[in-house]
Image (cartoon, rainbow, N blue to C red):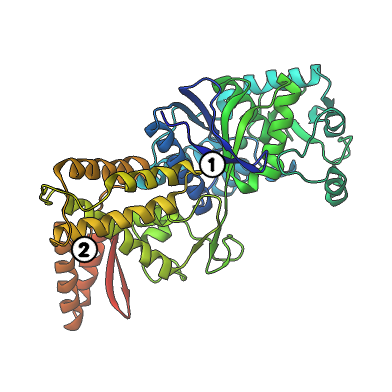
Amino acid sequence: MDNNLVVYNTLTRKKELFEPLNPPFVGMYVCGPTVYSDVHLGNCRTFVSFDLIYRYLLHSGYKVRYVRNITDAGHLEGDRDEGDDKFSKKARLEQLEPMEIVQRYTIGFHDVMQLFNTLPPGIEPTATGHIAEQIEMVKEIIKNGYAYESNGTVYFDVEKYSKEYNYTALTNRNIEELLANTRDLGGQGDKKGRLDFALWIKAKPEHIMRWPSPWSWGFPGWHIECSAMSSKYLGETFDIHGGGMDLAATHHTNEIAQSQACHHTHPARYWLHTNMLTVNGTRMSKSAGNGFLPGELFTGNHPLLTRGYSPMTVRFFMLQAHYRSTLDFSNEALEASEKGFRRLMNAIGLLDKLKASEKSDVDIRALKQRCYDAMNDDFNSPVAIAELFEAARMINSINDGKASISADDLEALKSLMNDFIFNILGLREESSPTDDLGQLVEFIINLRLEARANKDYATSDRIRNGLQELGIQLKDSKDGTTWSRI
Ligand SMILES: [Zn+2]
């Protein structure tokens, strides 16, 4: 086991040596999706980043219990206990049961995660499956004096908590400023303090998802589920807590407060956060109209995309940026990643054809060390990938007879490439324009072009629709026709 791993801890704002509480065991909790709509690409980046982290910890010999929850209740439209719950609203709009919404989007989320080749977590608990644990935790927080009930709703008393603990420890904000910037919510008069947040919410008559509790028929606040489920499966203190950077200021800050108020201990030793996505330099968001869904990215069905990109191209593209850096989507960058991914796959294909020589004039040991040094430096995948490109150049030179490699070095190079490309970066071979399927699809595309040239649009449409049914999407542009798997 490698114990040179250094991780950036949001809590201490510095890189620290990673020392698990009970090696070789590692407990890792990552905040999962809220399943009321298709999973957002920003979330996908977070889960691909933690998949890289999970894979590298496993590769390093740790036995990791990876817990990633599904939020299927309690997440209100405003993150500060305002508005409707997202499931009930969507259910009303689509005339479905809230649990039908949950089921539909949970399946959709798993499908996308599989396309990205992420390993499933060891436990994927749901908020609705852990109502009893959440109620017990709320009771304990009330008993310890950090929460109060008001008309059937229970609030966390941030002011009381702040007297003994540093409420804003995770983001290092000034609590006075925070107070000044927090709106005094009209109609939320049950709260004592402006920063107080709900642990349990009394259901309005029209609210469908509701459970009995000592305080009211209602539902849990959003933050309590992660505290209840992480402590249930990983213990009161565990090693890694992860999520998107946007969760740090409220959700994770409140998780820490709840755990301290309940167990008198900090829940996680290392807090890891992934950065956001931008598109052509501006922040990706639904309202700005530049937020595409994974499916749109794969098929190219979005005004900002000139064509579709395969899931492995997108995964590779994501890993070419460090998880704490912003990641900018552009057609040029995706195209460059597609070429880079193919270059690595071609190198892998050449490896088996290489002939060993008596002597090596390549230094595999140093290359391997540089790859591990990169990953041990806070999972620096872009640097590791740059080293793999160096390896690909080496493989091409050997193949061209411009360099030589010994049998031992060749074995070491094969295992290095396999370990990094498939096990750690989690890439996998895909069909491409150069393989059998690719050649067949190109052949069919040319038939369709001929049909169109003859103004036989019925045949052209039949070909397009037939391929679509087989999971192959065609996209026409001024440069010709491209295809991608759906
Ligand atoms: Zn969470």
The quarter of the picture where the C terminus appears is: bottom left
Residue 55: image location, x then y, percent:
40, 37
Q: To which residue does mark 2 refer? A: 433
- Mark 2 belongs to which amino acid? Pro
Q: To which residue does mark 1 refer? A: 33
> Could you tell me which secondary element the residue under label 2 belongs to?
loop
Spatial separation of the CA atoms under disc 2 and disc 1:
34 Å
Observer-nearest residue: 479 or 150? 479
Residue 248: image location, x then y, percent:
67, 43
Compared with residue 272, is residue 134 higher up or lower down, i.e. above or below? Answer: above
In the image, taking residue 214 as reference, residue 308 lies left or right, namely left
Residue 66: which disc? none
Residue 122: image location, x then y, percent:
44, 28
Compared with residue 415, is residue 213 higher up or lower down, i.e. above or below? Answer: above
> Could you tell me which secondary element the residue under label 1 belongs to?
loop
Q: Nearer the viewer, mark 2 or mark 1?
A: 2
Visible in this render: residue 312? yes
Q: Quadrant of ligand 1?
A: top right
